[in-house]
Amino acid sequence: MTKAYLIARVSTDDQIEALPAQTRRLLQYAEHNDYDYKLVEISESAYSGERSQFNEIIEEIKSIKQTVVLVFDKIDRYNRDLHSSSSRKLNKLCNDGKVELHFPSDNLVITEKSPATDKFRLGIGLLTAQYYSDAISDNVKRKNEQMLADGLWPGKAPFGYRNVVLEDGRKWIQVDAVKAEAVREAFQLYSTATSSLRQIRNRWEKHYGFAARTAQLDHVLHNPFYYGMMRRQGKLYKHAYEPLIDKQLFDQVEAVRQGYKNKKHRWGGLPYRYRGLIDCADCSCRITFEKKKGKYVYGHCTQSKGKHDISYIREEKFTKQLTRLFEDIQLPDHAYDKVSKALQESTQEQQLRHEEQISALKADVARYDNRLERIYDDLLDGNISQDIYDRKRKEFNESKQTKQTLLETFELSETDDKGSVLHLLKVARDAPKLFKKANIQQTRRLVKTVLSNLELQDDQLRWKLQKPFDTVLVCNKNANWLGR
């Protein structure tokens, strides 16, 4: 009887409710195939380098002499990085015939005899899962940007303030009276240029009982939040909370601290095809380009970190090397047709799950609204005390706010990952033609899309391929796209 491991995985404790549905589908699959199975439930991210539970299972599988079937409900429950350490281990076991990877909901099985198209589908599935995770992250960032535009701080309140939940359920930031007084005093003392950070820190500890490092105190004195502005990724936004000091006092402190001086950066601005894209492998300086004899373009290291032996390489030599690369990563038409069709089917399932998650979250929000109405009626009817009502109202409002935030995140999420991945597949299919016809700006965009860590070693370019082009290259070199 075939030995199988059924892996039901969620990324966070918040997703724990999804485990029963995964488990049910895995058990049905195992019983249908008459497997001798072991069910393992894991709560750890598939997008993380540290996957201790999963690695323990791999080590356990290595000790089993017969071929082991490893079953995941879908590809995104397996991993989101084809080149992670756990993926490399399983790929080796799979190529050696020790492991088979089964994804029932994706109708995909990977074995040592799998054709390249199936392996490529696995790679695309991992890439799609990564895009979906990144899209959620991007939507959270957009929500935070909207909050900043509305004058709201999306994170933990700075020292001197505290995060609170108002009666209507809205999150707010209020002044903490004692800490706020310590902040005001710190600004006043430092602005006179007679008190050091260490002296102010000692006063905080003795007078207020606050233990702080000088670095933390320096951060406070540099934070514009206290005069009414929020700094986020170098930009300032006016906030809607109560300021602790005025702008004049903040500027006085900045003058004492001597502020930050903007460094001017020099940019030649000449339209060379590979300017700014290539680093020197010896010293990590940029490869710069210049024209000789009025018509020949050469690239060489800037040597800004010290002199060393360099070569002047004709731009045409770079182009020849990159042309060969784009020919190597060209995706055959038949492989493109098969993978894009599978991707479209997978995206339809993902869209359905996305809509189901939104519906479930809306139901949760409505349920907490009903509970809030019921406990208010109970209070009016005298069935519960004011203390119980206040405690329950706070509990329900916090739970409702959590679900509401998740709902907003999912509603903002656009399931356009299919379009992004299909675009990359088209780039792989048409790569040589695109590179040959591209102008300077198009060439630069194409190189950035396909390559990273582009370096020059002697007269040869070295690079790392972006996903999914690395998988295309492997399949082109080592496998028959049509299968066996």
Image (cartoon, helix red, strand yellow):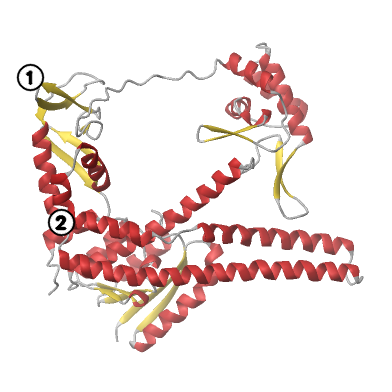
Secondary structure under badge 1?
loop
Q: CA distance from mark 1 to mark 2?
A: 36 Å
The disc, 1 or 2, on the residue closer to the chain's N-terminal end is 1
Instruction: Look at 15% across and 45% down and name the residue there.
Output: 437
Q: Is residue 200 left or right of residue 17?
A: right
Quadrant for the N terminus, please. Answer: bottom left
Q: Residues within 10 Å of mark 2 (few under 14, many from 20)?
A: many
Three-letter amino acid code of the residue under disc 1: Lys
Three-letter amino acid code of the residue under disc 2: Gln
Instruction: Look at 80% across and 71% down and name the residue there.
Output: 374
Q: Residues within 10 Å of mark 1 (few under 14, many from 20)?
A: few
Q: Is residue 167 visible?
A: yes
Residue 302 sits in which quadrant? Answer: top left
**Residue 105: image location, x then y, percent:** 37, 76
**Residue 375: image location, x then y, percent:** 81, 68
**Would you place residue 6 above or below residue 459 in this image?**
below
| Observer-nearest of 416 and 283 | 416
- Asked whether the beta carbons under mark 1 and mark 2 sit within 8 Å of each other, the answer is no
Instruction: Look at 44% across and 55% down and name the residue there.
Output: 135
Q: Looking at the image, is mark 1 or mark 2 nearer the viewer?
A: 1
Q: Which mark is residue 330?
A: 2
Q: Is residue 282 left or right of residue 32?
A: left
Q: Which mark is residue 172?
A: none
Quadrant for the C terminus, please. Answer: bottom left
Q: Is residue 172 left or right of residue 56?
A: right
**Residue 313: image location, x then y, percent:** 10, 29
Q: Is residue 56 left or right of residue 109?
A: right
| Observer-nearest of 388 and 238 | 238
Q: Which mark is residue 293?
A: 1
**Residue 404: image location, x then y, percent:** 63, 60
Please, which residue is most extreme toward the right here?
382
Figure label count = 2
